[in-house]
Image: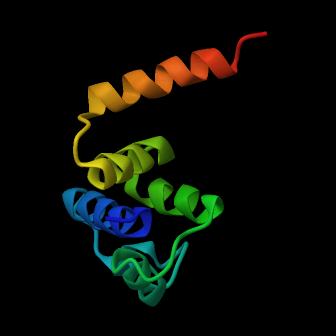
Amino acid sequence: MDVKEAFAGALKQARKNKGLTQEDFSDVSSRTYVSTLERGLKAPTIDKVEDLTSVMGIHPLTLLTLTYMIERNELDSAELLGLVTKELSQLTRL
């Protein structure tokens, strides 16, 4: 599965789990655009990820973490976040 397809699944899963419809994103995006994202036809910009997650009331990293959990299919959230924590520690050393 490619990352666009994984993002599509993550967005749809998060939206449905929050009890939202595609129309609920109308302040930040058209229903048609949300639909194209959920079908994996387009990839969002980082600004659009921010907009979408603000409507759902979740952190952008939550949606991206779910995306990579779906894409990799072998990591649970604790393993993935442990890896990210380790990499961030290495990248932010002075």
Tell me which corner region of the image, top left, top right, bottom left or bottom right, holds residue 62. top left
Horizontal and vertical percent position of residue 9? 28, 65
Q: Residue furthest right?
A: 94
Horizontal and vertical percent position of residue 7? 39, 63
**Residue at the location (48% across, 84% down)?**
33
Q: Is residue 81 toward the left or the right of residue 21 in the image?
A: right
**Residue at the location (56% across, 55% down)?**
50
Instruction: Tell me if residue 8 comes above or below residue 76 in the rendering.
Output: below
**Residue at the location (46% across, 55% down)?**
53
Relative depth, front residue between 94 and 20: 94
Horizontal and vertical percent position of residue 40? 39, 77
Tell me which corner region of the image, top left, top right, bottom left or bottom right, holds residue 16. bottom left
Instruction: Tell me if residue 65 comes above or below residue 41 in the rendering.
Output: above
Q: Is residue 60 toward the left or the right of residue 88 in the image?
A: left
Instruction: Tell me if residue 72 comes above or below residue 86 in the rendering.
Output: below
Q: Is residue 55 toward the left or the right of residue 88 in the image?
A: left
**Residue at the location (31% across, 65% down)?**
1
Relative depth, front residue between 6 and 47: 6
Q: Which residue lies furthest to the bottom in this view?
A: 32
